[in-house]
Image: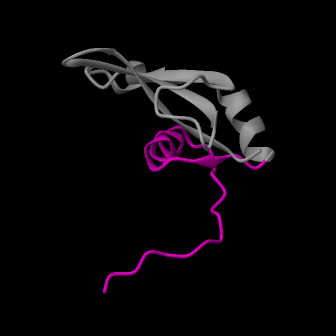
Amino acid sequence: MATVIRLSRQGRKNRPHYRVGVYDRRTRRDGPPIEKLGHYDPLIDDDEKKFTLNEDRIRYWLSVGADVSETVRSFLKRRGIAVPTRGGKKKTKK
């Protein structure tokens, strides 16, 4: 099963809140996660409280081959978690 660590939108209109979770690649945006790994609130000013992550479980899912969305990759980079790059096609401009 191909898995991806990505965001799922929660909250209400004009007050977004996101959950970080592990999803089957085919699951819709707000579908059920395999496991919840944290949350992200973009309206909080303090960067430390803006997002929380369960780093041990994230490392586990990365070790078993889960891909990471670009947004979650930037969160992990801020926390100092090394994300392996996948050797796929690179996007080129024409």
Displayed quadrant of residue 45: top left
For image coordinates 59% across by 28% down, the residue present is 21
Magenta stretch: helix, strand or loop mostly:
loop
**Span shown in magenta:** 65-94
Q: Is residue 17 above or below residue 69?
A: above
Q: How is the image coloured?
A: one colour
What is the quadrant of the C terminus in the image? bottom left
Rendering coords of residue 8 (x, y %):
46, 28
Rendering coords of residue 36 (x, y %):
62, 21
Q: In front here: 50 or 12?
A: 12
Rendering coords of residue 56 (x, y %):
73, 29
> Is 83 placed left or right of 62 in the picture?
left
Q: In front here: 37 or 81?
A: 37
Q: In front here: 59 or 15?
A: 15
What residue occupies the far top of the structure in this picture? 12
Rendering coords of residue 24 (x, y %):
66, 38
Displayed quadrant of residue 64: top right
The reply to whether the magenta stretch includes residue 82 is yes
For image coordinates 63% across by 62% down, the residue present is 85
What residue occupies the far left of the structure in this picture? 14
Q: Is residue 18 above or below residue 27?
A: above
What residue occupies the far right of the structure in this picture? 64
The reply to whether the magenta stretch includes residue 71 is yes
For image coordinates 45% across by 46% down, the residue present is 74
Q: Is residue 13 above or below residue 89?
A: above
Q: Is residue 6 above or below residue 86?
A: above
For image coordinates 65% across by 71% down, the residue present is 87
What is the quadrant of the N terminus in the image? top right
**How many marks overall?**
0
Displayed quadrant of residue 89: bottom right
